[in-house]
């Protein structure tokens, strides 16, 4: 019964965010204007800039920002108890993530679709641009390298997910062509989701395994194939694959959420996890501040700002669509994080508190596999769906989310490399093919780095993701705040979240820096120190700009009016 209370309170909070708070933010803070000519119209090239139906664009944005992170992070964070995890997911979604995502889309749209790193030059100053873009590139490198490894591992451990995952690409290509020819969106949505779930049923009965080829393991081959695919996908026009793939995946997640939340209503599972875990192991990190960087994408995430300003802003048809796409996308991710906490805390996963404590014996002992196991048992109990089909459905959902994030992530890396070509006047970097090859090469270099022939080398730098990603979220909110202050608007609604996020994430990064220094892990020490130093320089530069803007406004207010 406790699970129902968690769901009702969480959804009520997010409903307040959508129906009340997001309207206030859109109208009074960002002042989204329906008559503003967006970059999608002004710079329409049919490849990256393309006016898009807000429902289709929501699907792209939602699935691109979600990935596997709002599943993995909350599943790990439940270690400290379900109460702190639920509170941060709910409050973070309403007052942090939604504002962050809408603000990033708005700021980029108002600067001809520039990435958050590129527009920081215009908003703050030239010196911040390179620093900002370096942090952004590092986050993308971590996400792409590790998600490639995660998907490859899922294909190897759950071969039932292979057929539906690759079938989704074919379905998306067909839907994309039909949408481009103005076929009925509702009919295509129903047909696309039906085809996807049919492939899930087929996949559960027809597992596919990749044989060893050319002396390479199956896992290694999957990593290589995934990056070849991501490189090709990132160069295609957005309407061909990116938009329809993300839209169909968004719909299948919507169906998945209905199944998961419906399972709670139908079976009313008890909660085995403690509200606050009193049996924390001695080597576990402190809940504060690690809770916030562990949940990350389930509440607020710097990666969202990269997507919002990297691909989403280039496809916004009308500026008010930013609220629907950005804020509702954040709520979708928060809803996924919330049901993940229920799935890993419910008695369907561990029948007794003792069994739950065995499963959560240490920090990091749970993750996506825990969500799949717990969620599948909930769906089976609530809807009487065979457990094998339930597991395949959720495994496919995780794989497809990670895959769409890779699609967008490699495209975003291409944008950054091309922007560097513009900034430093290097003509060949502006070429899309060259930039894509460099992006994929960097990801593969990390994946196969440190002499790791399996392609799992990217996991070496993954511990940096949580704090670096959250620092980037804080810096994005900082850019938005400076922009609002310069325009003379109320910036407290972005400044307060910015201060909180930067404080907790910098604190977490500093604690990690000390740990890695003691362990003599010099690679992570160097990267962590570089991120902290770059962030501090951006903050100081922004503080100077804010001070100058306030002085200028104060001087203007004392000037006699004519």
Image: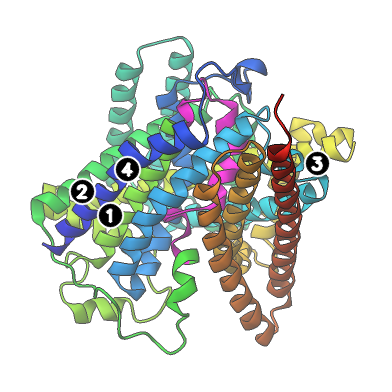
The residues colored magenta run 294-322
Tell me whether the residue at label 2 lies in contact with that at label 3, contact meaning CB atoms closer than 8 angstroms.
no
How many residues crowd around disc 4 within 10 Å: few (fewer than 14), some, or many (20 or more)? many
The relative height of residue 44 versus residue 540 in the rendered view (above or below) is: above
The mark nearer the N terminus, 4 or 3, is: 4
- Residue at mark 4: 203
- Residue at mark 2: 261
How many residues crowd around disc 2 within 10 Å: few (fewer than 14), some, or many (20 or more)? many
The mark nearer the N terminus, 1 or 3, is: 1
- Residue at mark 3: 420
Residue sitting at x 48%, y 24%: 173
Circle 4 — which element? helix
**Count of residue discs:** 4
Tell me: 374 left or right of 469. left
Tell me: 301 left or right of 471. left
The x, y position of residue 85, in whole percent, is 34, 65
The mark nearer the N terminus, 2 or 1, is: 2
Tell me whether the residue at label 4 lies in contact with that at label 2, contact meaning CB atoms closer than 8 angstroms.
no
Q: Which mark is residue 543?
A: none
The x, y position of residue 182, in whole percent, is 43, 10
- Residue at mark 1: 339
Return the residue nearer the eye: 254 or 86: 86
Residue sitting at x 50%, y 21%: 52
- Is 543 magenta? The answer is no
Tell me whether the residue at label 1 lies in contact with that at label 3, contact meaning CB atoms closer than 8 angstroms.
no
Which label lies toward us, 4 or 3? 3
**Could one spot residue 228 in this view of the protein?**
no
- Is 313 magenta? The answer is yes
Dominant secondary structure (helix, strand or loop) of the stretch shown in magenta:
helix
The quarter of the picture where residue 453 lies is bottom right
Circle 2 — which element? helix
The x, y position of residue 24, in whole percent, is 41, 37
């Amino acid at each position: 019964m406790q699970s129902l209370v968690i769901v009702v309170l969480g959804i009520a909070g997010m409903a307040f965010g959508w129906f009340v708070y997001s309207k206030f933010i859109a109208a009074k803070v960002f002042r989204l204007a329906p008559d503003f000519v967006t970059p999608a119209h002004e710079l329409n090239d049919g490849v990256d800039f393309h006016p898009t139906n807000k429902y289709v664009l929501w699907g792209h944005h939602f699935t691109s920002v979600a990935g596997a992170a709002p599943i993995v992070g909350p599943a790990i964070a439940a270690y400290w108890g379900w109460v702190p995890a639920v509170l941060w997911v709910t409050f973070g979604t309403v007052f942090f993530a939604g504002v962050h995502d809408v603000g990033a889309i708005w700021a980029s749209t108002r600067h001809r679709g520039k990435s958050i790193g590129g527009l920081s030059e215009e908003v703050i100053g030239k010196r911040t641009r390179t620093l900002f873009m370096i942090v952004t590139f590092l986050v993308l490198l971590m996400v792409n390298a590790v998600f490639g490894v995660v998907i490859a591992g899922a294909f190897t451990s759950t071969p039932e997910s292979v057929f539906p995952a690759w079938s989704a690409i074919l379905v998306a290509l067909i839907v994309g062509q039909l949408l481009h020819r103005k076929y009925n969106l509702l009919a295509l949505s129903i047909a696309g989701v039906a085809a996807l779930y049919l492939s899930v049923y087929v996949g559960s009965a027809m597992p596919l395994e990749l044989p060893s080829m050319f002396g390479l393991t199956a896992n290694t081959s999957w990593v290589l194939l995934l990056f070849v695919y991501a490189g090709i996908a990132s160069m295609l026009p957005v309407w061909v694959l990116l938009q329809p793939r993300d839209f169909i995946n968004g719909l299948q997640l919507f169906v998945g959420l209905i199944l998961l939340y419906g399972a709670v209503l139908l079976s009313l599972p008890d909660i085995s996890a403690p509200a606050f875990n009193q049996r924390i192991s001695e080597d576990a990190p402190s809940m504060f501040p690690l809770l916030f960087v562990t949940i990350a994408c389930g509440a607020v995430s710097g990666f969202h700002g990269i997507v919002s300003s990297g691909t989403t802003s280039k496809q916004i048809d009308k500026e008010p669509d930013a609220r629907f796409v950005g804020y509702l996308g954040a709520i979708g991710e928060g809803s996924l994080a919330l049901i993940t906490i229920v799935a890993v805390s419910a008695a369907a996963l561990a029948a007794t508190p003792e069994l739950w404590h065995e499963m959560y014996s240490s920090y990091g002992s749970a993750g996506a596999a825990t969500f799949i196991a717990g969620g599948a048992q909930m769906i089976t109990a609530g809807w009487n769906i065979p457990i094998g089909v339930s597991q395949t459905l959720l495994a496919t959902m995780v794989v497809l989310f990670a895959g769409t994030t890779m699609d967008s992530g490699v495209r975003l890396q291409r944008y950054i490399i091309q922007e560097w070509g513009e900034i430093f006047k290097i003509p060949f970097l502006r070429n899309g093919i060259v930039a894509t090859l460099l992006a994929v090469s960097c990801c593969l270099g990390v994946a196969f780095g440190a002499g790791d022939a399996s392609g799992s080398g990217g996991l070496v730098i993954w511990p940096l993701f949580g704090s670096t990603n959250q620092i980037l979220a804080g810096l994005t909110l900082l850019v938005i705040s400076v922009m609002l202050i310069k325009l003379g608007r109320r910036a407290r609604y972005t400044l307060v979240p910015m201060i909180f996020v930067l404080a907790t994430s910098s604190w977490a990064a500093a604690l990690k820096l000390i740990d890695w220094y003691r362990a003599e892990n010099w690679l992570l020490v160097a990267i962590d120190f570089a991120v902290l130093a770059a962030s501090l320089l951006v903050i100081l530069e922004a503080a100077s700009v804010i001070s100058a803007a306030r002085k200028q406004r104060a001087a203007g207010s004392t000037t006699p009016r004519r």
